[in-house]
């Protein structure tokens, strides 16, 4: 069962079809009674009606501002919940929900954890002395008007704060994979602004400083860079590792050699992520990475409340 039917829901549906083939039965909870039918997907228009579909698990992929409401409904179903990032655009009710979800398998989707270069670096970091790390820099800049070519970007949820828009939430991936690789910081600072020529109310620039015991990490995000750039730089006392997430490679600048050149793309991570989640659903295990509790700690770094 999928809650919502936007662009990300369509990616999840495609991934589920690739995993299960013709055996999969898909349902979608939708809000527009006049919406066109979806091929191979049963449409529902209320939680009560969709519960009768008896799903094995549910994917929450409606607007960020509706996630908490959806989780509140779904808790009583007592089935695994896959939550599209971020958990919410507010910290209200987060701690209460964490308590109520303690016996339910939850996973918060941050698919960059499944990109080849990030997975390579996760394993590679275990082979080096991390006390030699001096500095970490993450940058992700892209151009919001290019994100959805079929709509006015000013009317998209990304541009509207009340719907959960804002670059700090849209690109929470970067904070997430930093923590996936290096753990939670001892302290964090943030600067959130909306002053660019895009003329939107949502945050379009975000800068984070995260303190670790031996080094400092910075994360810079924006909506207005004409040519996309998505990089991670790790500086040690003898090496500089430059990770290009768009091209999925890792270059060591001192030696002038590539450590990793992947053939997968960010598009492939959606299926890999769902395969990971489904493995836990079918095994009844609860100790999944990026559970609701872990993702709520990430959200508390990003949101200024």
Image (spheres, rainbow, N blue to C red):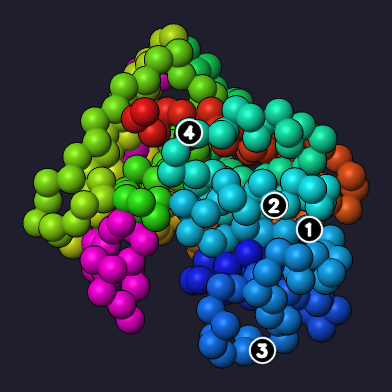
Front-most of residues 87 and 291? 87
Asked which secondary structure carries label 4, the reply is loop
Instruction: Pick whichever, 291 or 272, lies toward us.
Output: 291
Dot 1, how many residues are within 10 Å of its Cα: few (below 14), some (14-19), or many (20+)?
A: some
Mark 1–mark 2 Cα distance, whole angstroms, equals 14 Å
Cα separation, mark 1 vs mark 4, equals 25 Å
Please state if 54 lies on the left or on the right of 63 as rendered.
right
Q: Is residue 180 above or below residue 5?
A: above
**Mark 2 element type:** helix
User: Mark 3 = which residue?
Assistant: 39
Q: What numbered label is drawn on residue 103?
A: none
Find numbered disc 3 in the image and state the secondary structure of the residue it sits on: loop
Q: Is residue 157 above or below residue 188?
A: below
Q: Position of residue 163 (x, y in %)?
A: 39, 55
**For the magenta stretch, what is the residue range?**
132-160
Which quadrant is the N terminus positioned in? Answer: bottom right
Which is more foreground, mark 4 or mark 2?
2
Marks 1 and 3, the one that precedes in the sequence = 3
The residue pinned by badge 1 equals 57
Q: Compared to 25, does 65 lie above or below?
A: above
- Quadrant in the picture for residue 54: bottom right
Q: Nearer the viewer, residue 233 or 228?
A: 228
What's the residue at 48%, 59% (across, down)? 63
- Label 4 and label 3: CA atoms lie apart by 37 Å
- Residue 82, given in percent of the width and then of the height, sits at 68, 52
**Tag 2 or tag 4, which sits nearer the N-term?**
2
């Amino acid at each position: 069962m999928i809650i919502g039917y936007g662009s990300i829901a369509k990616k999840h549906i495609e991934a589920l079809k690739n995993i299960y083939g013709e055996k999969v039965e898909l349902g979608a909870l939708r809000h527009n009674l006049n919406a066109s039918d979806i091929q191979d997907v049963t449409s529902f228009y209320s939680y009560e009606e969709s519960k009768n579909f008896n799903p094995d698990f549910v994917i929450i992929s409606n607007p960020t501002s509706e996630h908490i409401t959806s989780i509140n409904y779904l808790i009583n179903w007592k089935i695994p919940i896959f939550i599209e990032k971020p958990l919410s655009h507010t910290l209200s009710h987060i701690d209460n929900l964490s308590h109520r979800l303690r016996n339910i398998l939850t996973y918060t989707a941050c698919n960059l954890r499944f990109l080849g270069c990030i997975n390579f670096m996760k394993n590679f970091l275990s082979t080096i002395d991390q006390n030699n790390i001096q500095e970490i820099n993450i940058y992700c800049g892209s151009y919001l008007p290019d994100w959805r070519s079929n709509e006015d970007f000013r009317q998209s949820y990304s541009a509207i704060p009340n719907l959960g828009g804002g670059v700090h939430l849209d690109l929470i991936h970067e904070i997430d994979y930093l923590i996936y690789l290096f753990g939670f910081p001892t302290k964090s600072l943030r600067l959130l602004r909306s002053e660019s020529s895009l003329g939107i109310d949502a945050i379009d620039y975000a800068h984070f400083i995260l303190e670790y015991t031996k080094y400092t990490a910075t994360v810079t995000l924006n909506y207005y860079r004409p040519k996309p750039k998505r990089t991670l730089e790790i500086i040690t006392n003898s090496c500089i590792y430059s990770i290009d997430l768009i091209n999925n490679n890792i270059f060591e600048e001192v030696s002038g050699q590539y450590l990793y050149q992947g053939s997968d793309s960010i598009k492939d991570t959606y299926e890999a992520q769902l395969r990971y989640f489904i493995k836990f659903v079918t095994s009844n295990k609860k100790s999944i990475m990026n559970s609701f509790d872990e993702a709520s700690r990430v959200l508390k770094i990003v949101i200024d409340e």
